[in-house]
Image: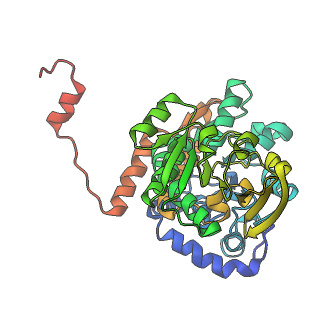
Amino acid sequence: MATTRRYDVKDLALAKEGVRRIAWADQNMPVLAAIRERFESEQPLAGFRIAACLHVTTETANLARTLKAGGADVVLCASNPLSTQDETAAALVEEYDVSVFAINGEDNDTYYRHIEAAVDHKPQITMDDGADVIGVLHAHRREQLGDVIGGTEETTTGVIRLKALERDGALGFPIIAVNEAKTKHLFDNRYGTGQSTVDGIIRATNKLIAGSKVVVAAYGWCGRGVANRARGMGAHVIVTEIDPLKAIEAVMDGFEVLTMERAAEIGDIFVTATGNRGVIRAEHMERMKDGAILANTGHFNVEIDIPALRSMATDTREARHLVDEFTMEDGRKLYLLADGRLVNLAVAEGHPAQVMDMSFANQALSAEFIVGNAASLERKVYDVPEDIDTEIARLKLETMGVDIDMLSEDQAKYLASWDEGT
């Protein structure tokens, strides 16, 4: 179809390939497809404008299609300059009539200009992966806050920022923290991040994981996913942590736990997954051995102190695509992947569609929930309602052909009682 939409993408001629790839992802997203079918008939989002700042991938395309099927007017921009799949962006504009502002490799000015374009849509609902649209609204477009009935947030880093806004009494509208849904973080964060991060490191470097010492910074759901996938490929995995409980978990799960200072001396591959800044700093890089590889799978490229790395280097060059080589004063070489950005999306293709099926089902149903409950929602960060979480799990099992048991009447009565003896 000829589009009448506003857009800024690399090349609409890429649309045909994008359609093929979107269809491939769609066949692995049956829960979202079922929601899309219902949305098409019920139109729960009819008349609502949605500004979504998400990774522009084939999986996100199927979410955009679902929101549009529900009647929403959707504008999509990228939540990371290196995660956009240009063919997907082109297909969304040309074939699915969705406004998209995203180009792979866009510079910082273009990135924020695209976010502003999404905000120009005057959204009533926001969807974020990292809270950038919400950040722009709160910082520069406060006059629009009253038009927004609610938003959703996809990732840990964004939820942290939004809870800080809430604590300060500055949150302008209610947010559903999609990341906190069990059907999101237990699967997307753990299995999706784990597989796609290791995939990104391998694609970038073609290094053998087996026998390597892989240092994983943080043992949250993303970190434990990376640690387990790396161990499964034969790596000796070392975990660094600041949380005593998570550190004990890592120890009990069979991983070596060290400080970053000690791990820096022995690691071959370093992966940050903390959501914080300055996790790998100059004092760590000074201790690293020749050939150490630095990668990040947290949302922003601040977890590795890149300015410090650049200032320490006497020479830099691109060793491979998205692999920068930094030569230290003593001759050691350190390698930074994807400019410290999300290695799983910048180098690989992000999380597999099977897990994003549940994550984006949460996004779609949370948008529906916001529309249905806008009058009663306060300016707070809410978890995804438990009934939505449970329904998504039920649908996923159904599409996988998996049956589970149900409580008998007697069992349900027993669990609900307080006076049953042993």
Left or right, residue 67 beside residue 357: right
Residue closest to the eye, 104 or 101: 104
Residue closest to the eye, 16 or 46: 16
Residue 327 on image: x %, y %: 79, 58
To which quarter of the image does residue 318 belong?
bottom right
Quadrant in the picture for the C terminus: top left
Left or right, residue 62 beside residue 37: right
Could you tell me if residue 1 is visible in this image?
no
Residue 211 on image: x %, y %: 49, 60
Residue, x 40% and y 42% (percent of image)?
253
Of all residues, the one furthest to the front in this rendering is 330
Q: How is the model colour-coded?
A: rainbow
Say above or below: 324 vs 275.
below
Could you tell me if residue 241 is visible in this image?
yes
Residue, x 46% and y 46% (percent of image)?
186
Residue 181 on image: x %, y %: 49, 43
To which quarter of the image does residue 264 belong?
top right
Residue closest to the eye, 273 or 130: 273
Residue 265 on image: x %, y %: 62, 46
Left or right, residue 81 beside residue 220: right
Say above or below: 51 vs 201.
above
Quadrant in the picture for the N terminus: bottom right
Residue, x 64% and y 38% (percent of image)?
261
Left or right, residue 232 beside residue 416: right
